[in-house]
Image: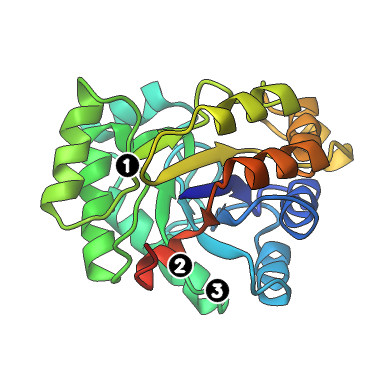
Amino acid sequence: MLIINADDFGFTSDVNEGIVESHRQGILTSTTLMANGAAFEEAAALAAATPTLAVGAHLTVVGGRSVRNPNQALPASLAALVAAVLRGGIPLYEEFAAQIRKIRTAGVPITHLDTHKHAHLLPPVALALARVSREFGIPWVRRPLYASGLGSISQRILSRAGCRMTDRFEGYSDTGRLSEERLIGVLRNLSAGSTELMCHPGYLREELAAARTRLKQQRRQELAALTSPKVRRVIEEAGIRVTDYRRLAAGER
């Protein structure tokens, strides 16, 4: 089973449009919404208008403004986040909880949780993620990067808290490079079990061009790959079962 999830829903309007287009005209099954995104309200409206698109929470403690305290900027990088956590300068659980509440207040049911910049690779962030997963009743979370080191610690934290994860997570090494050819390569090499494939589709217009992100023209390339008829044929010929976290939560096998 394969979940194709677009990160950064709510980041900008052109990213929102690319995500919805990748779902309506392509293979995308799922996305995760940034509560502190500049185009959050538009994304929430698009989610309501696109009920077949499963929407999770892209919990953010790197980049942008805090939802808990809008006057506060979040750490600008993972290194800055580590420093903030070490000095007790960021209440991780409270920030995550505020973001989940904002998404739910906007009327968007949350199917699963992940973190911007894969912040839950860090054990303190994984602990906060595990707590909101349990307390808000959202058991499915993204498998942390890497099977050793910090990633293995964070995986154990999440597992012991009762969080559920796919068997594998793909797409990190293809970030910014997910062309039609590379996507077909991923599809043809899928292992048995469940896999989440991360992607970042979008259009490149004035809003995204001005945004602080390294992924600009690459988002348009990913959009083209996700809506490629050739990619869809590969999925059909390989018998790949595409799904989302909502259906997994409902007990799909």
Instruction: From the viewer's perspective, tell me whether residue 18 is left or right of residue 36.
Output: right
| Whole-number angstrom distance, CA of label 2 to CA of label 1 | 16 Å
**Mark before the other along the chain sequence, 2 or 3:** 3
The reply to whether residue 176 is in sight is no
| Residue 112 versus residue 175 in the image, above or below | below
Q: Nearer the viewer, residue 121 or 88?
A: 121
Displayed quadrant of residue 232: top right
Instruction: From the viewer's perspective, tell me whether residue 116 is left or right of residue 136.
Output: right
**Mark before the other along the chain sequence, 3 or 1:** 3
Q: Which numbered mark, 2 or 1, is in the foreground of this view? A: 1
Q: Nearer the viewer, residue 28 or 57?
A: 28
Please report the residue visible at 38 percent of the width from the left and 40 percent of the height from the top.
192
Q: Amino acid at mark 1?
A: Asp
Displayed quadrant of residue 121: top left
Q: Which residue is mark 2?
A: 246
Instruction: From the viewer's perspective, tell me whether residue 203 is left or right of residue 117.
Output: right
Percent of width and height locating residue 148: 21, 21
Secondary structure of residue under mark 3? loop
Percent of width and height locating residue 16: 74, 53
| Residue 11 versus residue 79 in the image, above or below | below
Q: Amino acid at mark 3?
A: Val
Secondary structure of residue under mark 2? helix
Q: Which mark is residue 108?
A: 3
Percent of width and height locating residue 85: 26, 34
Please report the residue visible at 46 percent of the width from the left and 46 percent of the height from the top.
60
